[in-house]
Amino acid sequence: MHNLIARSGERHLIQNLDGINKADPRQRAWIEVDPFAVESNTRNLVSRLSKDCVLMAVVKADGYGHGAETVARAALKGGARNLGIATLQEGIELRKAGFTCPILVLGNLIEIEDFSACLQWNLMPTLSSEREALICQNIAKSKSAIFSVQIKFDTGMTRLGCDLDQAPKLIENIFNFSHLDLKGVYSHLALADEEQNGQMRTVTSKQQQRFEKLLELLPQGKKNLCFHLANSAGTLRDKSLHYDMVRVGLSLYGYTPMRHLKEDLGLQPALAVKARVTLIREVPRGVGVSYGHSFITARPSRLAVVGIGYADGVNRALSGRISVLFNGSFVPQVGAITMDQLVLDATDQPDLEIGSVVTLLGKEGDQCITPQEWSDLSGSIPWEVLCGFKHRLPRVVI
Ligand SMILES: *Cc1c(COP(=O)(O)O)cnc(C)c1O
């Protein structure tokens, strides 16, 4: 019994029974977020911009899984001037949290009530058509208010945005609408993160040419509005894509969007996913592990069950393909990843015991496991890996 109590997991249990530590979010599995990394990444990225170009921190999807408020605060400290979010609700939450900087809703809103709420909460909607412009004009007029809006044009992404052949009419109408204040004109790159040769280069430069044509459509004297095109990849790729503002998401969180880029940009990963060992199993050779027995022990093995699974955002497609970090070594994960648990082969890790903390993603000492590594193994992209962590994982700001 003494032996058992000495183990850190047991100590934890006993503390909990005593009612101490009950609210510790590190009981099972959690995300650690380092706001100083976001702040320093923002500074790093701002230093790459010319002095009249500002940085919008894109904090949609709860700050790419890091917690929108935490990262928004850190990015503004690091020199970001604007925030970008995807949904109305995300914007309202930031306003309720006290953020006063310009906030752009990058997604398209549908209902009149949604545009009304934008005006009420001082969020800039993105307009992709006449319909939305007219809704905004009518709302603002009925409230005797001026509605700040931005227009998005489709220069080749073929998703949101107004067709370029309708651009002259839309721009003209917007300037004639008495209650609209057009703050910005933007577009979005489709291939900026790909290696730019042949067709890839052509697509990006075509998008850029089309975007610059829009400048010519703007009436004289209205050129103080903000022109923006670049995401993280565009920002890091080419200064000529910067214009008046860049909209940076992934790189704020510490990753390069261009996998072919070997240069060290000095970005710091801001997130780590950690979990604790909940059980140690000693099993003989020839034993099938987890659903489907896709892993069979090849030797008498010491298996460690960790309390994290695909319901937390560890994609099941990673089963048997990843390792976790423990005391500077990589410990292989074996068998199928299940909803709430996964299993490690800890045969070579005698120090790994009940209650031990392992790092699934992020930095531990000099080692780091990146979302890119996971996404390569699961046929995904780093953006999706980061957004895939569920709210069941508490976020601990360090
Ligand atoms: C998400 C988003 C971004 C940020 O993209 P990253 O590749 O994460 O930098 C920029 N612009 C728009 C319109 C977006 O939707």
Image (spheres, grey):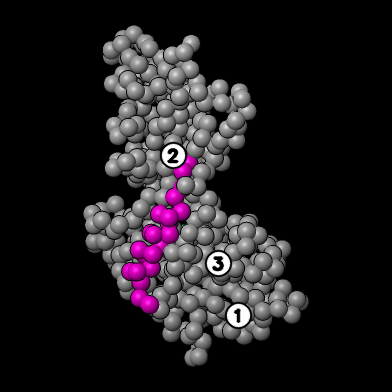
**The residue stretch that appears in magenta:** 31-51
Image coords of residue 312 (percent x, y): 51, 35
Q: Nearer the viewer, residue 156 or 283?
A: 283
Q: Identify the mark nearer the N-term, 1 or 2.
A: 1
User: Which label sits on residue 241?
Assistant: none
Label 3 with label 2: CB-CB less than 8 Å: no
Q: For mark 3, does the 10 Å Cα neighbourhood hold few (<14), some (14 to 19), or many (20 or more) residues? A: many
Q: Is residue 218 left or right of residue 131?
A: left
For badge 2, the amino acid type reads: Val
Residue for point 37% across, 10% down: 283
Q: Is residue 194 visible?
A: no
Residue for badge 2: 273
Q: Identify the mark nearer the N-term, 3 or 1.
A: 3
Residue for badge 3: 104
Image coords of residue 156 (percent x, y): 41, 65
Q: Disc 3 vs disc 2: which is toward the camera?
A: 2
Residue for point 39% across, 36% down: 359
Residue for point 43% across, 85% down: 216
Q: Give the CA distance from mark 3 to mark 2.
A: 30 Å
For badge 1, the amino acid type reads: Asp
Q: Identify the mark nearer the N-term, 3 or 2.
A: 3
Residue for badge 1: 181
